[in-house]
Every structure is written in C-alpha cells, then in structure tokens.
Image (spheres, rainbow, N blue to C red):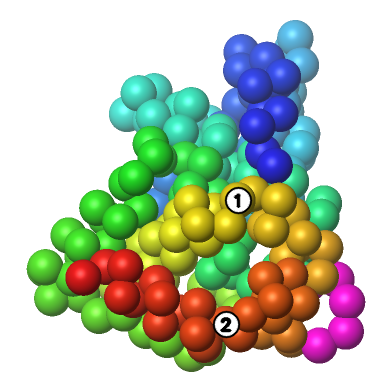
Amino acid sequence: MCRSYSAWAIDNVVLAEKPNRPFASRCRLVRSNSRGDSWVEGLVSSLTVPILPRHADTIAQVVRHEYTHVVVYELAPGCPAWINEGLASYEQYPPGTGKERIKAWLARGGKVIPFGEVPLSFMSSPDPSAIRGYYIQSHSMMEFLIDRYGLGKIRLLLRELNKKGDWTAAFRRAFSRSFEATEKDWLDSLN
Ligand SMILES: [Zn+2]
C-alpha cells in the first residue's frame, strides 16, 4: 500500500514538528522549494517548525509514518485513528516490532483497551499515557492483520470504510469475519 513512498526524493521533503508535542508522529510532511519555503504536502497537523537535529536518525522512519497518513487520507478520509496510526506505525517500524512493543507495554503494566472503546480520534484524548497505549496496540493489531491476511485485505478495508456503516461493518465486509472474533485471535496471539 505505502511502498511507493520510496519513489519520493527524501532530500526535498522536510519534516515539520508541531510544537509542544512529545511525539515525532505529530509531524507532517511538507516539501520545500529552492528558496527554503515550504508548503503542506500531507494534512497531518496544523503548525510548522523546522525539524530538530535529534530527529535526524529517525527521519526515514518518520517520513514513512507520515507518508502513510497521506496515503490513508487519500484512500479513506474518515479512517478511524487506530487503523490509521496502526498502519503508519507498521510502516514506520521494522517487521515484528508491533508484537515486541505491545509485550513490553503489557510487561510495564500497560493495559489493552478494546478497540471498540478506543476514540475515533486520538487528538481528543487528554491522557498521554492512554494515547501511547492506543498507538502501541494499534501497531500490534495492524501487524497481526497484515501478517495473517495480507495487505490486499487492508486495501479492501480502506475502500469499505468509505461506504455506509461504522468501521466494524467495513471490517466484516473486508475480512468476511467479525471484528470481535478477530480481536480475540489477536489477543490470543500475544500469549
Ligand atoms: Zn501518526
């Protein structure tokens, strides 16, 4: 789905960070021209400051993450945050790390929240720890789905999200399976 980001020239993409936000994932992608002006390429956040040197090592990761949002926005503008961030995290991190991250989160006392109770937008949640948990479990779930069913099903899910009904209905159409049963499979896979 997002593999085409490699076609982008990294050296003319600038990362812009939203001030006072702890997560690099609150960045958006902009392109800069030869005069150093920049303009919005993907709608991810609202304020722009130059990328900080400490992000240099992770620039490729963050570009993959944010570019996934651009792609998801194109395919399914109303995509729930957990699917969107789960896919972006899947593209951001090396293979297999979704499971590692959630196991570490659970070992530190983190809790899994049923996806039906996860807010459709993470921005509305006031609790940074809860938001961190949403990201981690979303990453793990999307990794589980892609490993088991393939990216083709994810493309189908994004298409179905544009149709009538909530995301659980879209999920059932795309996967021919209830989300509840799939969520249980995912939880079992973490043991
Ligand atoms: Zn994100």
Res 172 seen here: yes
Amino acid residing under circle 1: Gly
Label 2: which secondary element: helix
Secondary structure beneath dot 1 equals: loop
Q: CA distance from mark 1 to mark 2?
A: 16 Å
Q: Residue at x 71, y 29 (%)?
A: 4
Name the side, left or right, on which 168 lies relative to 110: right
- The answer to whether residue 119 is seen in the rendering is no
Region in magenta:
161-165
Say if 62 sits above or below 103 in the image: above
Image position of 119 (left or right of 99)? right
Q: Is residue 37 or residue 145 the one in the foreground?
A: 145
Q: Which residue is mark 2?
A: 179
Q: Which residue is mark 1?
A: 150
Where residue 45 sits: x, y (%)?
63, 54
Query: In the visual, does 14 lie left or right of 191?
Result: right
Rendered residue at 50%/85% (across/down)? 181
Image x and y of residue 23, in percent: 40, 52
Q: Would you identify the image quadrant in which residue 29 lies?
A: top right
User: Which quarter of the picture shows residue 106?
Assistant: bottom left
Q: Residue at x 24, y 53 (%)?
A: 100
Which quadrant: the C terminus? bottom left
Q: Residue furthest left?
A: 108
Cβ–Cβ under 8 Å for marks 1 and 2: no
Nearest the eye: 70 or 21:
70
Which numbered tag is attached to residue 175? none
Residue 164 is one of the magenta-drawn residues: yes
Quarter of the image where the N terminus is located: top right
Q: How busy is the neighbourhood of tag 1: few (under 14 within 10 Å), some, or many (20 plus)?
A: few
